[in-house]
Image (cartoon, rainbow, N blue to C red):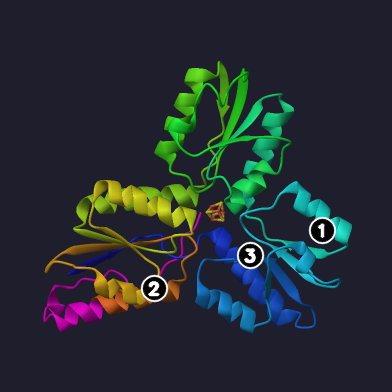
Amino acid sequence: MKIVLSETLSYCFGVRKTLELTDKLLAERPDRTYYMLGEIVHNEHVIEDLMAKGLCIVQTLEDVPPGGVVILQSHGSTRKRYRELEERGLEYVDATCPMVKIIHDRIREVEAEGRTPVVIGQVGHEEVRGIVGQVARALVVKAPDEVTPELFEGVRRAGVVSQSTFIEEDALRIVERIRGIVPDVVFHDTICQPTKTRQREVEAHTRRADCVIVIGSKHSANTMHLFHIARKINPQTHLIDKPENVETIAIPAGATVFVASGASTPGELIEEVVRRLEARDGVSGRPEEKTAALPGKVKGGGA
Ligand code: SF4
């Protein structure tokens, strides 16, 4: 077995920055209680670790008592949430990724220009909620077939932005459909560079691999996008969110296995998957065939 690791594995810089900031706050100010709305990453071990260090995970600001400090996550928040924080007199630390802030700026510009704001992304996703929450009203579409004359009825000028982790090719197809209906469309390509780099690597390596393993949660949008990109090219693509799941994947002898991960997948999880793959290879009696690219060391994905 030959194991090829993606160049950009584990956290993107936005998620890493939020995690590092949270760790630092918990260590330096143990006298304060920090709250986060929802989970910072889709991984129970990371969440358990942060909770053990004192972080409280809540679902709404109503659950934060006076004196609590709220950490706003990398995927951004609605304007309403900032207002609510002020109204409740709650202190907060804003860890919104700078690239998400750019999307917020773009959609506000679109609205200021008198265009109908359109967001390419998944309805209900936290990041999309944050983007939509920057303007009075926005249309959200996630697939070309959702772009219908009915949805865009009366729209003469539109300004389109994208969720940071969307698939570039799909976003362009959606924009093309909108241009077929709306006479004046501007598109701000706001898919972040770390996402594009990761997606391009997955596409290139998947073409040369016999089997692809994408590590991450099915609740993570960027992980699912990587999975779909790879699956379209190679049906032997598997999504796993626990190291033990790798044992259930049938890998032919001598196969080249490409390993990729989502932007919120912890490095330890990836290392454990690779370790299990290596151990499995050893058990099969072919350790000399294994050429794991980065055993025991996982690189993070930078900008
Ligand atoms: S996926 Fe991109 S925009 Fe989102 S947190 Fe990571 S770097 Fe920032």
Viewer-closest of 275 and 37: 37
Q: Which element type, helix, strand or loop, lies under badge 3?
A: loop
Mark before the other along the chain sequence, 3 or 1: 3
Asked if residue 95 shows in the view, the reply is yes
Find residue 89 and report its image quarter: bottom right
Relative to 262, 48 lies left or right: right
Q: Is residue 96 above or below residue 20?
A: above
**Residue 159 lies in magenta, yes or no?**
no
Where's residue 190, x and y in %? 55, 41
Q: Image point 47% across, 71% down: which residue?
A: 266
Relative to 215, 61 lies left or right: right
Q: Image point 55% across, 44% down: which residue?
A: 163
Residue at image mark 3: 38
**Residue 288 lies in magenta, yes or no?**
yes
Where's residue 52, x and y in %? 62, 84
> Is disc 3 in contact with disc 1, using a CB cutoff of under 8 Å?
no
Assign the N terminus to one quadrant of the image.
bottom left
Q: Which mark is drawn over residue 36?
A: none
Viewer-closest of 79 and 198: 79
Whole-number angstrom distance, CA of label 3 to CA of label 2: 21 Å
Where's residue 142, x and y in %? 49, 39
Q: Is residue 66 above or below residue 195?
A: below
Asked if residue 201 shows in the view, the reply is no
Magenta residues, start to end: 278-303
Relative to 260, 264 lies left or right: right
Q: Which mark is drawn over residue 85?
A: 1
Relative to 237, 41 lies left or right: right
